[in-house]
Image: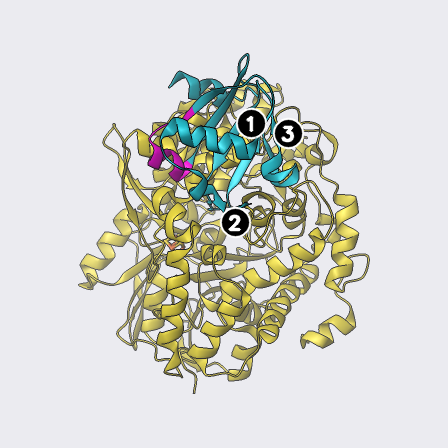
Amino acid sequence: MLGTYTGKLLRINLSTGEIKVEDIPEEYLRKYIGGRGLASYYLYKEVDPKVDPLSPENKLIFATGPLTGTAAPTGGRYMVVTKGPLTGTIASSNSGGFFGAELKHAGYDMLIVEGKSDKPVYIYINDDQVEIRDASHLWGKGTHYTTDKLKEETGLSRAKVACIGPAGENLVKFAAVINDKHRAAGRTGVGAVMGSKMLKAVIVKGSKKPKAATDKFLHVIREKTDTLRKDSITGEGLPKLGTKVLDNIINQNGLYPTRNFQTGVFEKTYEVSGEALVEKGYLIKNRACYACPIGCGRVTKLPTGLEGEGPEYETGWAFGADCGVSDLNAITEANFLCNDLGLDTISTGATIACAMELYERGILPKEDLQKGPELRFGNSEAIVYYTYKIAYREGLGDKLAEGSYRFAESYGHPEYSMSVKKQELPAYDPRGVQGHALEYATSNRGGCHVRGYMISPEILGVPEKLDPQSLEGKAEWVKIFQDLTAVIDSEGLCLFSSFALGADDYRDLLAAATGWDISTEEVMKAGERIWNLERVYNLKAGIDPKEDKLPKRFLEEPMPDGPNKGAVVKLDELLPKYYEVRGWTKEGIPTEEKLKELGIE
Amino acid sequence: MDERRDTDRGETKGTGNRIKIEFFATLRLVLGVAGLEIEADGPVTVRQLISIASEKLGTDISAKLMDGDKIKRGTMILVNGKNIHHLNGLDTLVKPGDRVAVFPPAGGG
Ligand code: SF4
């Protein structure tokens, strides 16, 4: 009946030690699909939007989708959903690897963690055997050590681990949850919420494979896998060069944010690009997440002997061009540090970049560096040094750990923080892409590129090429992309599959897995429902629609050079149109009718 | 090597009567060259440029970039940083001194 859902959630209260298993009503599943959607619904029902994100009243939800842990291509994704400490909005962070699939195999669609422990603990899940165990010996340790140690001491060598590093323990506002050592539920500070609950890790081992409701499932999987294999992006580009193929693309198109977004062309891209990684022989092999035929992950080894996964495009940019750094060794070292200390690479790099601009402008005084390396653009020593300091909240790191917005604000200049709703923007200068700029301004979890990746049509030409500077139809495109992304995140698939698959494909997979007679329209409606629910949560949390904005730089400072020279973002034209397309008031509030239509109480 | 560095520095022009073409991503790995320069006395179309480049390389790159007479979905050809989709497609004129960047279909994020 429930197909590839388990229909169960595991609820653990760390204050009382209570552990329960609950049924999930099928009605919720059909309305919110799973993963991001279902977890957002539980958060909406159970957590007061006004709650302090780092208080025991907040909850931390690990959620899989109906396709997580199945053989559906890219079906290894899970979400971490909570109220976020960086933005004060709903936070939801997606990750791959193997942890999500294992949680599903243990028999749970979701794990809801409540309350707060008074000493460090970890959660042990071996199918039906669930325990809260002491983690005092792991507190203060990195994610690599923690992962290995937990497998060793539980004797579950094939179990999967999601954990925090020192950054999460120290409540760094952009701390990540790291699973399988190298995969991150990176953004929005979900790791700090985990740290606030004194929860060091979750180790899980499962033995139950989900069973589809229809025999067609295998056939549909084969068909979609074939589409992904034959597509030139998912079948060739991503496997061969990984996400770093974008360095040159975005730079040549003139929107590669350089030195805290002061310009859109980085003169040293040739030294740090994906092509360089291959040509210099640093790339050892690809690595794929669970059930993924694409395999975009990179395993790299540097001349210094350092070996690990990454850097991905975003990370390479955040510590590279955004900080004006072209030393691939230092960039990769900072990347590996983030994984071990449990930090979001985008916010870490971008916060350091913001500090560099403040320093060069004379706003951040030298004595505040407390003898640390100079925060000058291009200083590769600085990116590694301050990454470490942030995780431990030492010296200037304590202030940087609050994120670029609060940091710049404390010096009286929040306008130098390149963030939306206090979360740092990723590696595309919005002045070069009007639709993507609108996506930044309206993202429900703050500055982010994976809530409606408009780079795909505006730059990459997929599914069709749109003029990046035109405003025509952009509001409509953004809405569709946002809704579709909510579907993908809720089904438990990877967003990268959407370079080759479309809404009908996601419907086919869901229908075959669950046995539901469901139309593409209903699936997209679920995506819209999820988007609106997140929006309502944010409004109730006190996030004013006036926060749907961009840093002044993008609206008032024309791009100084490159192909987009002279461009600014025309947000005042895009935003009213977007509210209209969404069926919201002109103030940006979902109307009664809209909520009724979507069935949101 | 040096040729690639010059253009990547963001210089928008080739030199003298030459058109500079650069290859990226898997195309660069397959061709084994980062780019080439083509001499031209006057403007040529992108279509012509592709066939001249194919001849020079000894490999027909048009099959990689074009679907019949159209640009392949996801293929990106930039003339001085502007996508030819929003110029004149394969009929876009390239002048001596211009810079052309060619990417096969690619994605990431
Ligand atoms: S495309 Fe990359 S990130 Fe996505 S599931 Fe596959 S390997 Fe993981």
Q: Is the C terminus of chain A in the top left, top right, bottom left or bottom right quadrant?
A: bottom right
Q: Amino acid at mark 3?
A: Tyr
Q: Which residue is mark 1?
A: A265
Q: Is disc 1 on the same chain as disc 3?
A: yes
Q: Give the chain of mark 2.
A: B
Q: Give the chain of mark 3.
A: A
Residue A411 - label: 3
| Residue A343 is one of the magenta-drawn residues | no
Between marks 2 and 1 in the image, the one whose residue lies nearer the viewer: 2
Q: Is disc 1 on the same chain as disc 2?
A: no
The answer to whether any part of residue A393 appears in the image is no
- Stretch in magenta: B25-35
Look at 49% across and 68% down and name the residue there. Answer: A505
Disc 2 and disc 3: Cα gap in Å?
48 Å
Chain cyan in the figure, letter: B
Decide which of A529, B91 is in the foreground and name it.
B91
Chain yellow in the figure, letter: A
